Image (tube, rainbow, N blue to C red):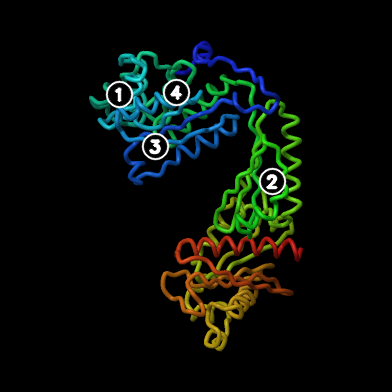
Amino acid sequence: MILQPEIHNSLRLPSKQSEAGIFATKNTMNAHIIAIGDELLIGQVINTNAAWLGEKLTEIGIHVDKMLVIPDEETAIVDQLEKSCAEASIVIVSGGLGPTKDDITKTGICRFLGSSMVFNEDVYQLILNYLKRQGREPNPLIREHCYFPKETVFLKNNMGTAPGMAYRYKDALIISVPGVPYEMRFIMENEGIELIKALDDGQIILSKTILTAGEFEARLAHRIQDITDAMPAHISIAFLPNINQVRLRLTIRGTDQVSMEKKLNEFVNRIEERLGNQVFGHGKESLSEVVGKLLVKNDLTMSTAESCTGGFLAHKITEIPGSSAYYCGSIISYSNELKMNLLDVKRETLESVGAVSEETVCEMVAGLLEKTGTDIAVAVSGIAGPDGGTAEKPVGTIWLACGNREKTVAKKIILAKDRLKNIEGAAMHALDMLRHFILSEY
């Protein structure tokens, strides 16, 4: 079931030489990702495979043109393969390789190729051995599971019973993988990606992602508009917003990696210089990870006092391995009684200005520093919703404070009407506030 080098060669596409200059993109290999399954169309299952495949293909210089979801219908599979193989050099099909009646990807591919289904004894024995290792008994459906289009090149799957499959159709490479995410990833990481790399047409795609926090997408775009307007045609920028964060992904296409890296870094540096401390990292770094590194670098400890976030801020901090080196713990003072009893918030403060106020979160910080002895404390109090809002303090009103024994800063943010988004948003704003506090005070 391991793909042999000579089979790689048999699946190789014709090489394409660029005739339009160093940064020509018309000959760049492109891909379609087709997910098969009614469960995806009705929203029962989220299509995480497409996102993972898109990221991995982009990393190796493949331009993903389309991501599609189609039903468990043989005609739909055949029709989409016809379209995709006419438009793309690589077609990846995910899903529909199981042993049950709704798994019809193999028969759809067979019909598309004008081929016939044949039994594969090697695959059958591999599945029997896999089931034996799992302590499971085979059933009659397993044998039916081992019929494949006769042209199939198998890609090993050590995580399940359905092997990956590869085919050459005219100028297109078709790779079919199971829909189970960890099985799909094993097949692609061990053989699928290498098979695609063997199709190299000389084109390169490089990208770099700048991570920012604390500014809306539109305002960021306005601030760097003159820089993005100066980008040549072979460089593109995408703004990818999330809660209190925007990722800026710069992508360059061409054939000369050295000159491409130089040009890409030129624009990355210009943007970062313009945005300053709003840039917190690169690539796949998280805000929690960056804050943790700052705490370690400055030999600082911290603690949190949470009300409306109910421990979510602590969760974001402790999801980073090694966070015990700087994070000491949290007091989740959801009620006013606990704010008074555990954090020494004054009763008169709560009665005069309420729990969601600058005064309260500042007193929460002071009480937390006293109770825990950490270098820095962060406090959050707000109205997560959907109830509890007033005209003066609507749902989504959050007060944050961050401080040490010399200085405490506080700010109010107004988020949305959605409870879970408010909880997550408050935590992310608090982390960014902590980051700025460390950068300014240490």
Position of residue 332 relative to residue 30, above or below, is below
Q: Name the residue tied to disc 3.
A: 69
Question: What residue type is disc 2 on?
Answer: Thr
Image depth: mark 3 or mark 2 in front: 2
Residue at left offset 51%, top offset 23%: 89
Image depth: mark 1 or mark 4 in front: 4
Q: CA distance from mark 1 to mark 2?
A: 52 Å
Residue 145: mark in rendering: 1
Q: CA distance from mark 4 to mark 3?
A: 16 Å
Question: What residue type is disc 4 on?
Answer: Cys
Q: CA distance from mark 3 to mark 2?
A: 33 Å
For residue 376, which quarter of the picture?
Answer: bottom right
Determine whether the residue tagged by mark 3 lies in a helix, strand or loop. Answer: strand
Mark nearer the N terminus (1 vs 3): 3
Q: Are marks 1 and 2 in contact (CB under 8 Å)?
A: no
Mark nearer the N terminus (1 vs 2): 1
Mark nearer the N terminus (3 vs 2): 3
Which image quadrant: the C terminus? Answer: bottom right
Which image quadrant: the N terminus? Answer: top left
Position of residue 151 relative to residue 39, above or below, is above
